[in-house]
């Protein structure tokens, strides 16, 4: 009997107690199936260290903020160890392809968290199925209750532009081959330029609209890039945030996404984050 009581008490003391609470989760899904997961965590009072599980195997761009300041972490298998030192707020952000899947034209987002999850679907998405009753739906944003949840959606079909008709049906195959060769070499040159294999490390673009269409940028991202360009191509993150009225956390996530896409480079100068464009643009016909 005594041995049983001692074993019971030992199990109680050895059982790990969750040293934090998950306040909210926001997931932004992109058209290519990648998703940005952003978790807000509140450590328990007096805690100096927490372990946060990662619900995915494949991820990139992992970043941690403790009370608004980016901090280091220890990756321990499927968990990250963060030293909070009595902080009141921890933010974890990363990108992953693991929570989305596609069957035919139908996409699915599968999530499982202990807090409500707000999923922001790509623009012009159509929700075709839900595993549960949503807490809130607004435009392309949907909030689901805690637990295992699945959202099914379709991406709106975008009709390709019609090619110009060929008026001369007797066009020789030699001319067609010549056109294909020019297009192929042009594409190869463009790719090398964008990857920094040309004389300049920065790609040259005719307009910002090229980036907006190619990377599905939102209005804040477009305004931020134009602000950086207007101020010489390199500015402090804080200056962009203050000028555009973007909250600190939103700006941090935005620049991490732009950095992941290779559009900007983030560096530290005198303990301040600076952002530099990785391309050159013209402002012709830009709003």
Image (cartoon, rainbow, N blue to C red):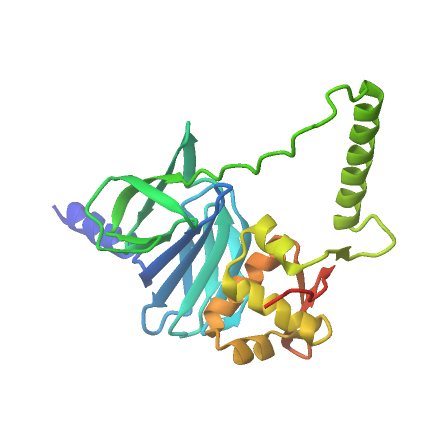
Task: State which quarter of the image contains the C terminus.
Answer: bottom right
Q: Which residue lies at the image location 60% right of the left edge and 74% below the top edge?
A: 237
Q: Which residue lies at the image location 47% right of the left edge and 69% below the top edge?
A: 249
In the figure, 31 relative to 51: above or below? Answer: above
Q: Residue furthest left?
A: 1
In the figure, 98 relative to 122: above or below? Answer: above
- From the top left corner, tell me how far across and down residue 150 is, in percent: 30, 40
Closer to us: 253 or 161:
161
- From the top left corner, tell me how far across and down residue 270 is, in percent: 68, 79
Closer to us: 178 or 169:
169
Q: Residue furthest front?
A: 167
Residue 128 at least partly seen: yes
Query: In the drawing, does residue 240 fall left or right of residue 155?
Result: right
- From the top left corner, tell me how far across and down residue 136 is, in percent: 24, 56
Task: State which quarter of the image contains the N terminus.
Answer: top left
Query: In the drawing, does residue 268 fall left or right of residue 29?
Result: right
Q: Which residue lies at the image location 53% right of the left edge and 55% below the top edge?
A: 62
Quadrant of the rendered image containing residue 148:
top left
In the figure, 198 relative to 287: above or below? Answer: above
Q: Which residue lies at the image location 44% right of the left edge and 43% below the top edge?
A: 56
In the figure, 33 relative to 264: above or below? Answer: above
Residue 274 at least partly seen: no
Please tell me how many numbered marks the rendered image carries: 0
- From the top left corner, tell me how far across and down residue 273 is, in percent: 63, 73
């Amino acid at each position: 009997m005594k041995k049983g009581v001692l074993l019971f008490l030992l199990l109680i003391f050895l059982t790990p107690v969750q040293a934090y609470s998950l306040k909210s989760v926001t997931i932004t899904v992109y058209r290519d199936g990648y998703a940005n997961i952003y978790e807000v965590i509140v450590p328990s009072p007096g805690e100096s260290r927490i372990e946060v599980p990662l619900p995915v195997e494949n991820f990139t761009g992992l970043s941690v903020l403790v009370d608004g300041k980016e901090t280091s972490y220890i990756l321990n298998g499927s968990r990250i160890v963060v030293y909070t030192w009595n902080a009141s707020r921890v933010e974890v952000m990363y990108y992953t392809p693991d929570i989305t899947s596609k069957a035919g034209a139908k996409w699915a987002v599968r999530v499982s968290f202990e807090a409500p999850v707000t999923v922001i679907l790509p623009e012009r998405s159509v929700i075709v199925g839900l595993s549960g009753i949503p807490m809130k739906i607004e435009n392309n944003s949907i909030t689901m209750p805690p637990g295992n949840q699945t959202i099914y959606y379709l991406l709106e079909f975008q009709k390709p532009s019609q090619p110009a008709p060929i008026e001369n049906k007797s066009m020789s195959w030699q001319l067609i081959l010549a056109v294909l060769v020019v297009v192929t070499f042009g594409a190869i040159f463009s790719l090398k330029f964008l990857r920094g294999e040309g004389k300049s490390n920065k790609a040259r673009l005719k307009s910002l609209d090229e980036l907006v269409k190619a990377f599905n940028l939102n209005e804040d991202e477009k305004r931020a890039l134009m602000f950086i360009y207007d101020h010489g191509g390199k500015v402090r993150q804080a200056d962009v945030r203050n000028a555009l009225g973007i909250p600190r956390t939103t700006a941090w996530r935005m620049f991490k996404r732009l950095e992941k896409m290779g559009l900007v480079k983030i560096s530290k100068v005198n303990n301040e984050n600076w952002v530099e464009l990785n391309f050159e643009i013209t402002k012709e016909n830009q709003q």
